[in-house]
Image (cartoon, rainbow, N blue to C red):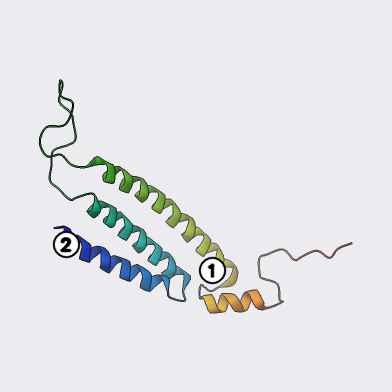
Amino acid sequence: MEAYLAVVVGAVFAGGFYLVMRRNLLRFVFGLILLSSGVNLLVFTVGRVSRGAPPIIPEGASAPVGEVANALPQALILTAIVIGFGLTVFAMVLLLRLYERLGTLRTDELQAHLASPRPVPGLPDEEAPA
């Protein structure tokens, strides 16, 4: 089972890196989403995939009895999912504002906007010093 998950993790990382290298910021954000999912799968795979009982210690014992599931990778992945969702929403809002102001998400066109001396629509003009 771990071998199949390792192949899936590699494919997800490859897709994420491919999208991050594109010249469109929306694809870049989707690549970040794929990379964070790949990291989550990697942590899950490294934490040993097993079908065990919940890690509950019976009364009077000092350790769980039998094979139990590893709770630490599950807790780390749950936290990473929440943080990744927050990062994704923040990045999507930034992209929406950028598209509203400049009308493009292509990086080469954004560089042309930054290099031009003309004012950007929607932004206040710089005031001349008195």
Q: Quadrant of the N terminus?
A: bottom left
Residue, far right: 130
Residue, far front: 62
Q: Quadrant of the C terminus?
A: bottom right
Of discs 1 and 2, which sits in the foreground? Answer: 2
Q: Residue at x 29, y 66 (%)?
A: 12
Taking the image as shown, residue 16 lies to the left or right of residue 90, namely left
Q: CA distance from mark 1 to mark 2?
A: 42 Å
Taking the image as shown, residue 16 lies to the left or right of residue 99, namely left
Residue 5 on image: x %, y % = 20, 60
Q: Residue at x 66, y 69 (%)?
A: 121
The type of residue carrying mark 1 is Tyr
Q: Dot 1, how many residues are within 10 Å of its Cα: few (below 14), some (14-19), or many (20+)?
A: few
Which residue is nearer to you in this view: 123 or 91? Answer: 91
Tag 1 secondary structure? helix
Of the image marks 1 and 2, the number of the one nearer the N terminus: 2
* Quarter of image, res 59: top left
Q: Residue at x 36, y 45 (%)?
A: 79
Q: Which residue is mark 1?
A: 99
Q: Dot 2, how many residues are within 10 Å of its Cα: few (below 14), some (14-19), or many (20+)?
A: few
Taking the image as shown, residue 72 lies to the left or right of residue 85, namely left
Residue 37 on image: x %, y % = 32, 58
Tag 2 secondary structure? helix
* Quarter of image, res 42: bottom left
The type of residue carrying mark 2 is Ala
Which residue is nearer to you in this view: 88 or 47? Answer: 47
Which residue is nearer to you in this view: 8 or 33? Answer: 8
Q: Residue at x 11, y 32 (%)?
A: 65
Residue 53 on image: x %, y % = 13, 38
Residue 85 on image: x %, y % = 39, 52
Residue, far left: 66
Q: Which mark is residue 3?
A: 2
